[in-house]
Amino acid sequence: MSKKRHAEEQELPFVALMDTMTNVVGVLVIVMVMIGITLARAASKVLSSLPPATEAQIVEVMSRLERLRAEQAPLQAKLAAPADVRTDPKAMERVDQELADLERQMKNRGLKPQDDAELIRDLARKDEELVKLKADASKITEERNNLKVQLDQTPIPLTPPAKVVRIPASRPIPKNARIEQVVVTKDGAYWVDEEALTRQFLGEFSLAGSREAIFSQVKRGNKRVTIYDAVKLKNYFEKRKLKTRGFDVTMGFEEWSRTWPVLTLRASGAPVADLGGILWRIKHKPNAVVMFRVTGDGYDHYLDAREVCDKLGIPAGWEYAFAPEAKCLINEIETNRPVPAAKDKSDEIKPPAAKID
């Protein structure tokens, strides 16, 4: 009795499972039926809204479909096996026509057809030229970059400020004026002490060279004048280095100096330390006039010296000097130097005379 009761207890869960499955299947069937009804209604509505097709339209559509199917067959065949140009007479004819046109154009332009080997060699030469041009361009670019770096590193010179030089109304130098020369350079002012320089020159000459350089002696009125040999005089002083304070001195002759020697003084060494004191002494000389010889880079020092000169009330003028030099005429010595022949000065343009301002 106990075994039979156990079997009945095992059948109960299976029955419940069957009931559940039946219910699910029933629900799905109902849903499918509802979907089918909905689709049927929608299709009926769409078909009812379309206009009815006529018999002629149906015939036209069917004929177009047949024609398209007929055209589709050769196209599919061509796609399956592409046609070879060499086996297509029309394609070959078209290619021959293009070749004939090309040959005619080349003949009209004077061009000759080249074979493949020549074209390959020409292409190789062009490639070599291209490689060379690229290398040259690389060198030029590198050089340009180096120059740009150097240019960027080069300091830009600053333009010095403009120099203002006064040029007031000038007037002629008095005939009995005593000219005192002052050479002005970038280093400063150099005073030409002509009296001391003349004494030094004559003293040096009288010590040893005067007798050797005598050319002749002539009588002029009650005086006896010694004429010296110009060549011996020049050679004598070329062996001696004349020097005065602030200047190197050389002796020579100028066209305007006639038979008298001329000393050329070139500024060297230290400039005058106390120009104001020198100008003060010049002021007390009778008929003294200061003439500044200014080089292109000496205008700053000239303006300072000119300010001192103006404060002291000394007549002065200035002129541009191409070189830091001054001339001193020694008219105490007469030589046998030939006097230059007089020139025709009718067409000669004279330089402006020195003036004071």
Image (cartoon, rainbow, N blue to C red):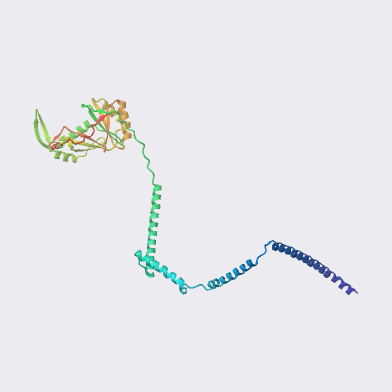
Name the quadrant of the C terminus.
top left
**Depth check, front residue: 94 or 312:** 94
- The location of residue 152, given as percent across then percent down, is 41, 47
On screen, residue 220 versus residue 16, left or right, reads left
Q: Residue 163 at x, y = what percent?
A: 34, 35
Residue nearest the viewer, comparing 157 with 171: 171
- Residue at screen point 86% across, 73% down: 7
Given the current orientation, which residue lies at the most extreme right position? 1
Residue plotted at (32% across, 34% down): 301
Q: Position of residue 26 (x, y in %)?
A: 79, 66
Q: Nearer the viewer, residue 342 or 48?
A: 48
Give residue 192's position: percent from left, percent from top.
25, 33
Looking at the image, residue 261 sits to the left or right of residue 184; the answer is left
Where on the picture, by quarter, is residue 288? top left
Quarter of the image where the N terminus is located: bottom right
The mark total stands at: 0
**For this rendering, which residue is in front, 142 or 308?**
142
Q: Tell me the quarter of the picture where residue 17 sits.
A: bottom right
Q: Is residue 157 above or below residue 112?
A: above
Give the image quarter of residue 296.
top left
Q: Which residue is depicted at the point 40% across and 50% down?
A: 148
